[in-house]
Amino acid sequence: MTAGIGVIVRAVPNQHKCTAFLSTGRSEGRQAERTRCITVRIAGFFVCRRLGQQCFAFCNGNWNKGRAQDGNWMARQRLAIIGAGPKAVAIATKAACLRDLAALPLEVVIFERDVIGAAWTGQFGYTDGLQRLCTPAERDVGFPYDTDLAADLDRAMLARFSWTAFQIETERYGDWVDRGRPKPTHQDFAQYLAWCLSGLGPIRFGPVTALKHRNGRWSVRYTSRDSGASISEGRFDGVVVTGPGPQSTNLRKVADGRIFDGVDFWRPGVIAAVKQAAASGPDDPVVIIGSGGTAAATAAALVRADISNDIRVLGSQAALYARADSYFENRTFRDPKFWSALSAADRRTFSDRLTRGAVWSNVVNVLAGVERIDYLQGAAKEVRFDPPGTVGGALMVVYAPSAHPDAEVPLQASAVIDATGFDPMWFRTLLSPSLARKLNNEKKMRTQMASDLSLPLEGVPRLHVPMISQAVGPAYNSLMALGSLSDAVLRPYVSAALA
Ligand SMILES: Cc1cc2nc3c(=O)[nH]c(=O)nc-3n(C[C@H](O)[C@H](O)[C@H](O)COP(=O)(O)OP(=O)(O)OC[C@H]3O[C@@H](n4cnc5c(N)ncnc54)[C@H](O)[C@@H]3O)c2cc1C
């Protein structure tokens, strides 16, 4: 906190008005200018906001009757976010609303490797962009609009950044309602994210290559897309890492052009390559390894692409578990009190049942209607050539049924798609080796995560990783409650600005 200079505040609590006497400095006297401003309640503080001009004074809720008191300048807070996806948009838009409401000196800088919403466009893997979200459009960047950070914040978010505001501004609202409020395609969602961020402030394009901390602040190094230069930008109070990460490398696989993964499968032209591989072994199935949403979406895409081979989805679970929309499940995603009353085991069961390894029922129903698709239970051990070592020979997936974990059952494949999941700890490679080593204890990182979704790392400024935050709340790694996610991440910075 910096001591206030020349700002004297008298507040009238509950009237949401205060009178601020602004002077240009103590030596010049106290009443150089007199003005009225509005008081906004933020994180328990009354913050004075002089309309049209920043007035970094706050009343702190204390009213010393008849006595003017010195106000304080708010302390500037800077937050860096890696990735311009929905999480970054949720945080940056709420910070923008806080700045508007109360001139809160809260700066958010986003670093994006490709384009805003890249993972949803269909141009950079993860999706073809044509699939629809599994969650409804109303779960937008402000949902569930129940923030306790500041009065009027939900109203501002809803008016400026909601899906409805986007539909109205792009003149599609009536049509969208008349069509039964369909879930957006991933491409539509990417457009919405870009619309939210338009004109909002700093986005640096280019991959982040390193994160360093010194004297309690982070610096972010990235390779500028425009100039190709390696640039370091510093003095961040915290960093948020977003995104599911690249394909996980847990499954041992030989290098071969007939093997694809859950990220690359969706890049332009790759489904045609899978089709070609499948056609060269028409009697062997295409094998998709995994039992979650990516595996199911991949199988559905192969059917749409008219691949005539059998399709075997090979997963370690007993079945492709279906998830439907249910009030009782949905409300748990946005009820922190309910969540905190659950045991660790119940939280894990909930997450496993509803997020990891669960497929939305509409997708399961599509797959169930296609006779050449079948599900095989088994934990894949490796993908190798047959006989082993014959590069370019037959492709063999080796797996073990759960009742016989030591068994090695071979399954010949024309093409293989590794949809076993992503690596949310990918950012380890950005850190110094000593810090990266601390993250090797992934269980500790997950179970001892702070309520602001930062990792339990002593002596290190906040490093928020919502993708591994299931122990704190069930919604922060998905689109289920992006408004709650932004509250959780921004809360310490709002408090620090005012403290
Ligand atoms: C295909 C798919 C569909 C999904 N559908 C749903 C759904 O319908 N409902 C739901 O609740 N959840 C869904 N999820 C799960 C989950 O919501 C998302 O994975 C997650 O919330 C994505 O949001 P994000 O902002 O964290 O990351 P992303 O949107 O993935 O954004 C991460 C960004 O980081 C960028 N990036 C990566 N590396 C770097 C780097 N080194 N430097 C700079 N930038 C970098 C990427 O280009 C990307 O734009 C889906 C996941 C996937 C993969």
Image (spheres, helix red, strand yellow):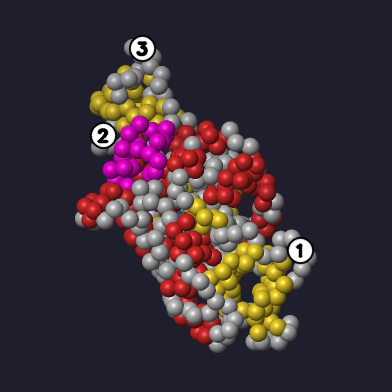
Residue at disc 3, CB closer than 8 Å to ligand 1 = no
In the image, residue 209 lies at what x, y percent? 55, 63
CA distance for labels 1 and 2: 70 Å
Q: Is residue 485 left or right of residue 102?
A: right
In the image, residue 67 lies at what x, y percent? 36, 14
Q: Which quadrant of the view contains residue 172? A: bottom left
Q: Point out the frontmost of discs 3 and 1.
A: 1
Q: Which residues are magenta?
A: 140-162
In the image, residue 244 lies at what x, y percent? 53, 58
CA distance for labels 3 and 1: 77 Å
N-terminal-most mark, 2 or 3: 2
The residue under the point 41% across, 27% down is: 45
Contact, mark 1 vs mark 2 (Cβ under 8 Å)? no
Q: Is residue 25 above or below residue 281?
A: above
CA distance for labels 2 and 3: 24 Å
Tell me the kind of residue under disc 3. Answer: Lys
Residue 404's disc is: 1
The residue to which callout 3 is attached is: 65
Residue at the outermost top position: 66
Choose between 43 and 262: the one closer to the eye: 262
Q: Point out the frontmost of discs 1 and 2.
A: 1
The residue to which callout 2 is attached is: 51
